[in-house]
Amino acid sequence: MKCDEIQNELILYYYKELDSEKSAVVDTHLKQCQTCRDMLKEIEETLRLVDQRRDIEPGEELWDSYLDNVYQKIDESSPLARFYKNVFIEPKLAPILATSLLVIILVASSSLYLVNKNKTYEQMQLAQNIDLFMDFDLIQNLDLLENLELLQETDISNEQKT
Ligand SMILES: [Zn+2]
C-alpha cells in the first residue's frame, strides 16, 4: 500500500478497528516509513486530546444533527469528500470519525502545503478540497460540544431532528 492509503487507515489503526490483515499491513509499513510513523504520532497526540473532550459524552441526537450538517456540506463537493462520507456511513465509527475528521484535515493540510511546491494537478485539487473542509467550521462545531448543555436547552438538536 502507498503512504496515502496507509495514512487513511491510521485513525482506525489507532482505535484498533482495523481487521488483523490490514492492521498487519499498516504495522509492516510503519516499520519502514518514517513519514507515516510521524503522521501516526501526530494523530495519536491529537486524538488523545479529542478523546479527553469526548468524555463530555454528547447524546445521539447531537451526533445525528452534527453529522447531518457535515453530510450536507460534503454533498456539495468532490470525490475526496464522498470518500469521507463513505467512511462516515459506518455507524459505529461515526462519532469517532466525526471528531477525527478535523485531525485528518489539519494534519493533511499542513503536510500538503509543504508538498504543494511540486504542484501536480492532483495535489492542487486535494488542497482545494481541504480548504473546503476547513470552511465547514468544524472547529466551531467541536467547540459547540463543550457547550452541550446550552445546546440542549435551546433545543437546537430537536429542530434538526424533524
Ligand atoms: Zn508511508
Image (cartoon, rainbow, N blue to C red):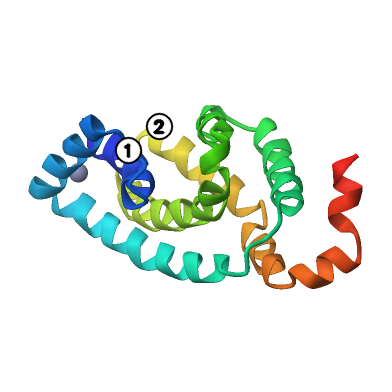
Mark 1 and mark 2 lie on one chain; the one further toward the N terminus is 1
Q: In terms of depth relative to the viewer, which is nearer, 17 or 87?
A: 17
Query: Is 72 situated above or below 106?
Result: above
User: Which percent across, then down, holds residue 159?
Assistant: 91, 49
Residue visible at 68% across and 72% down in the picture: 146
State the SS at label 1: loop
Q: Nearer the viewer, mark 1 or mark 2?
A: 1
Query: Is 101 situated above or below 152?
Result: above
Q: Name the residue under label 2.
A: 122
The Cα atoms of the two marked residues, 1 and 2, are separated by 28 Å
State the SS at label 2: helix
Kind of residue sitting beneath label 2:
Glu
Q: In terms of depth relative to the viewer, which is nearer, 25 or 58?
A: 58
Task: Say the numbered circle drawn on residue 51.
Answer: none
Q: Name the residue under label 1.
A: 18
- For disc 1, the neighbor class at 10 Å (few under 14, some 14 to 19, many from 20) is some
Tell which quarter ligand 1 is in. Answer: top left
Specify the quadrant of the image occupied by residue 26: top left
Specify the quadrant of the image occupied by residue 59: bottom right
For the view shown, which residue lies furthest in the left direction?
A: 32
User: Which percent across, then down, holds residue 66?
Assistant: 71, 50
User: Which percent across, then down, holds residue 86?
Assistant: 54, 29
Residue visible at 49% across and 53% down in the picture: 100
Query: Is 39 situated above or below 52?
Result: above
Q: Quadrant of the C terminus?
A: top right
Q: In terms of depth relative to the viewer, which is nearer, 134 or 56?
A: 56
Q: Is disc 1 in contact with disc 2, using a CB cutoff of under 8 Å?
A: no
Kind of residue sitting beneath label 1:
Leu
Q: In which quarter of the image is the N terminus?
A: top left
Residue visible at 84% across and 64% down in the picture: 152
User: Which percent across, then down, holds residue 40?
Assistant: 28, 55
In the shown orientation, is residue 19 left or right of residue 29?
right
